Image: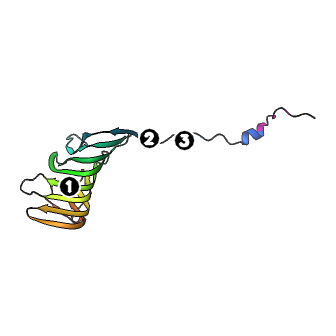
Amino acid sequence: MGCSGGRKADPVADKNQAAPPEKKQDPELPKTIHAGSGSSEQYSEGPKREKQWSVKWEEAQIDVTEQAKLGRMQKVSGELFADGKPKGTYSADSGFADKGKNLLVLKGKVRISSNDPKLKATLLCDEVRYDADEKLVRARGNVRVESEQGNLSTLSELWATPDLTSFGTPDMFKTK
């Protein structure tokens, strides 16, 4: 008795076999850059190209894709701008910048001081989200405001302009 050395081609069976699955294209993976100390600035879109914030850091990780530039930074400081002018200075343990959304998030021992010499106000909290398009600071967690005019303390959330000249609860601010 012998063994068959191979399979005979069956054209009908071969047509019914599933074609190999198409290779899916991988989604765009970010290019990650680890950096030591450095700085960056964010500018608005359009013809005016006004500065929206500046940031300095001691250590950073930057993820760059075609759609976005995201940065995670440690020990940050810088300035918040509105209408192209510096309105306040800040510092925090860490920060996250999404340049595509014009959003700066600060976390851990956040401190924002008004540049208005008449006001001399400082906002202290656990976390801030600065929306540069709306020119709005959203502070959360153990929020305090200290100024020569008086102090506010132990608020869970407070919204303010970057110069701290206007602030209140979220329902007091109209947003887009």
Amino acid type of the residue that numbered disc 2 sits on in the rendered structure: Leu
Q: Residue furthest left?
A: 118
Residue in the picture at 41% in, 41% down: 30
Amino acid type of the residue that numbered disc 3 sits on in the rendered structure: Lys
The C terminus sits in image quarter: bottom left
Real-space CA distance between mark 3 and mark 2, rounded to the nearest whole angstrom: 14 Å
**Does residue 25 appear to the left or right of 119 in the view shown?**
right
Q: Upstream in the sequence, badge 1 or badge 3?
A: 3
Identify the residue position indicated by label 3 in the image: 24
Tag 1: Cα neighbours inside 10 Å, few (<14), some, or many (≥20)?
many
Q: Upstream in the sequence, badge 2 or badge 1?
A: 2
How far from the left and from the top, in percent, is residue 173? 22, 62
How far from the left and from the top, in percent, is residue 52? 21, 46
Residue in the picture at 20% in, 51% down: 90
Q: Quadrant of residue 124?
A: bottom left
Q: Nearer the viewer, residue 8 or 74?
A: 74
Q: Quadrant of residue 149?
A: bottom left
In magenta, the rendered stretch is 1-11
Identify the residue position indicated by label 2 in the image: 29
